[in-house]
Image (spheres, helix red, strand yellow):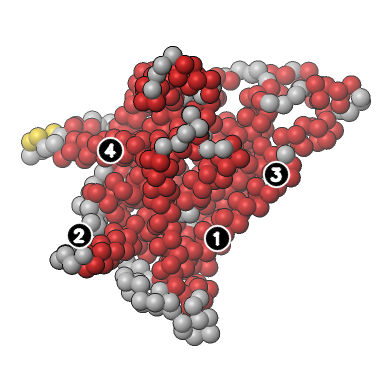
Amino acid sequence: MLQKLRQDARLQGLLLISPTLLWMMVLLIIPLLLTVVTSFGQRDTDGNVIYRFTLENYTRLIGFTAEGFDPLYFTILWRSLALALQTTVVSILLAYPLAFYIARAVPKRRNTLLFLVLVPLWTNFVIRIYAWIMILRTQGVLNSILGWGAGLVGLPFTPLDMYPSQGAVLIGMVYEFLPFMILPIYTSLEKIDGSLFEAAADLGANALRTFLRVTLPLSMPGVVAGTILTFIPVVGTFVVSDILGGRQVILVGNLIQRQFLEARNPPFGSAVSILLMVMTLFFTLYYTRRFGFGEEITAG
Amino acid sequence: MNRRSPWLTLSALAVYFFLYAPIVVLVLFSFNSSRTNIVFEGVVNRGACGPFYWFCQLAGNNDVLEATRNTLIIALISTLVSTLIGTLAAIALQRYAFPFKRTSEAMLYVPIVIPEIVMGIGILVFFSAIFRWLNANLGLQGDARLAMGLTTVIVSHIAFSVPFVIMIVRARLHGFDKSLEEAAMDLGANELVTFRRVTLPLIAPGVLSGALLAFTLSLDDFIITFFTTGPGATTLPIYVYGLLRRVITPEVNALSTIWILAVLLLVFISRQMERRSA
């Protein structure tokens, strides 16, 4: 037996990976399949799942209820997608100049500059949102500074109502995931061969033209990877909207969470969860097919 | 391209400001003398601890201590297990050909391309079904009933960190000169000795960064913990989240400040270790 193992490389490989495979099977694949099964099930009054087939959860999700058509869940879905898209766009706009700056810095300083991007990421996810409450609330830091500034120039000032709001959620989302956009963009910018810029200059391109025709296209893999790394977590999170949006900004994540912990309706929550998964898988597939699968996603 | 436009520098500085302003505010307010913690009313100076009043309050808070203990237990065990099985899997994927290799690789990407909440919900649905079935069939009553807790959180954390450990260890194995192992075997070392004396020291930095990533992922995790935790298994992020929905005192800031310092220290140590082994 041991002798056979020593000679059979295929068996050795399988043996080495089997603990991981087993773990992922039990805690990822089976749970996902069970979620699909549950989404076609029903529940009793205690919120226990009854495994009896029904399409009711999905028809409800689409908007057909006993009272007629109600696009409530479509609105939530749409809001989540729109917010994820806004977060991604704002993140690209903020991340690109910084990534460009770091990539152009002297090699010795690059590591330090990158390190500085990572530090905020190591503070806790929940704590980062909490910091924004302190800044954005009516008597918070930002309003204090604005009020002080207005006082200096003698303007009347009424504190801005920024928290809780959808804008606060957007800021929080961008803040949470910005480093995931900066890192892959930096990785792809750093890889660009410097002689390409010289060639572009020799051929008479100005700085803007060089950027548009050389730098931007070559850094696209980084932008693609960053988009995937930002869009997917944003579209599914419920914590940022829960805390910074008060109870007004309901996203898909909040909908799912409430079905499980408040409404006690696991089958419907499972259906929403499956829809969310299918949507992000389609997004990733379409997006990577269209723009190529950036290897930066693993390097970042 | 060495000319840098002042606009670029300025916008880079602005983004750094955006990244750091919240952290500065957080730390500053942990020294606030106002208990309501809305306006900064000067540095607190109370009791034996003086400006560190809120930090001392924290040390006497049993909920915080328990949450800290839970967080560390979960992070340590899940890091240990995920690093061990992840390193083995990385070696398998990088070195061996075996049945279902492509399928295994695809499966490892799943936790990265689906939202965390989907995985969290899946595990919740899975454990509720299993526990309900077991409790009914084994006739477990009262406190003996199986329920979510530390164990469910730990096994879930292992599941989401393994793919990241594998990714990092594989990257290290990729640049690995196989002839070193062959040389060791030629010189009469058996597989085990070769692995211990040649392979392991060479991939150690990769294993270490993998472990560090697993540890920080576990420390930082909110969503999956939220769906797999139970009574008595509150972690720090879950505890802070609970507080945010009720009342916010400078204690939360003090907790955040300690957290940031601890993680920075951890990162600093690991960088030093990496530098030494490089």
Give a yes or no on whether discs 4 and 2 share a subunit: yes
Residue at the image position 40 percent from the left and 41 percent from the top: B6
Q: Position of residue A275 (x, y in %)?
A: 30, 32
Element at label 1: helix
| Subunit that carries the residue with mark 3 | B
Q: Which mark is residue B114?
A: none
| Subunit that carries the residue with mark 4 | A
Which amino acid is tagged 3? Arg
A281 versus B228 height, above or below:
above
Which amino acid is tagged 1? Leu
Crowding near the residue tagged with mark 1, few <14, some 14–19, many ≥20 C-alpha atoms within 10 Å: few
Residue of label 3 = B275
Q: Quadrant of residue A72?
A: top left
Is B70 on the left-hand or right-hand side of A130? right
Q: CA distance from mark 4 to mark 1?
A: 32 Å
Give the number of the mark in front: 3 or 1.
Answer: 3
Give a yes or no on whether discs 3 and 4 share a subunit: no
| Subunit that carries the residue with mark 2 | A
Which amino acid is tagged 2? Leu
